[in-house]
Image: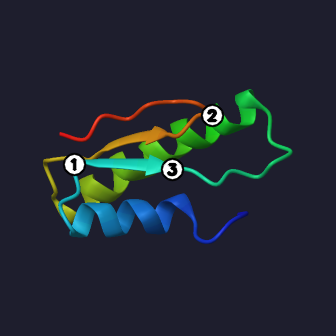
């Protein structure tokens, strides 16, 4: 993994803190869009398995930040 933490740790923290929306960012600069999208799919799969294993029914939304993207704060 590259960056400050792994997506799995971020997901675990978000689930335990009842976060509604986790946005992954700070991707490896040399990563292509396809690689980043695969990491998103992997992160969502991990979220699903992690929540199932701990009996959590409300899953946080997981997305990735994109350059010039806008994320609404609800």
User: How does the figure colour the protein chain or chains?
Assistant: rainbow
Circle 1 residues within 10 Å: few <14, some 14–19, many ≥20: few
Q: CA distance from mark 1 to mark 2?
A: 22 Å
State the quadrant of the C terminus. top left
Apparent side of residue 38 relative to residue 65 in the rendered image (left or right): right
Circle 2 residues within 10 Å: few <14, some 14–19, many ≥20: few
Q: Which mark is residue 24?
A: 3
Q: Secondary structure at mark 2?
A: loop
Q: Position of residue 69 (x, y in %)?
A: 51, 30
Q: Secondary structure at mark 3?
A: strand
Eyeballing the image, is 28 above or below 8? Answer: above
> What residue lies at 13% left-to-right and 48% top-to-bottom?
57
Q: Secondary structure at mark 1?
A: loop
> What residue lies at 51% left-to-right and 40% top-to-bottom?
64
State the quadrant of the N terminus. bottom right
Query: How many dots with numbers?
Result: 3
Viewer-closest of 28 and 41? 28
Which label lies toward us, 1 or 2? 2
- Residue labelled with disc 1: 20
């Amino acid at each position: 993994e590259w960056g400050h933490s792994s997506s799995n740790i971020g997901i675990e923290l978000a689930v335990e803190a009842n976060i509604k929306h986790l946005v992954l960012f700070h991707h490896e600069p040399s990563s292509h869009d396809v690689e980043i999208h695969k990491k998103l799919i992997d992160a969502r799969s991990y979220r699903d398995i992690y929540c199932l294993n701990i009996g959590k029914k409300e899953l946080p939304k997981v997305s990735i930040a994109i350059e010039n993207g806008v994320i609404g704060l609800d």
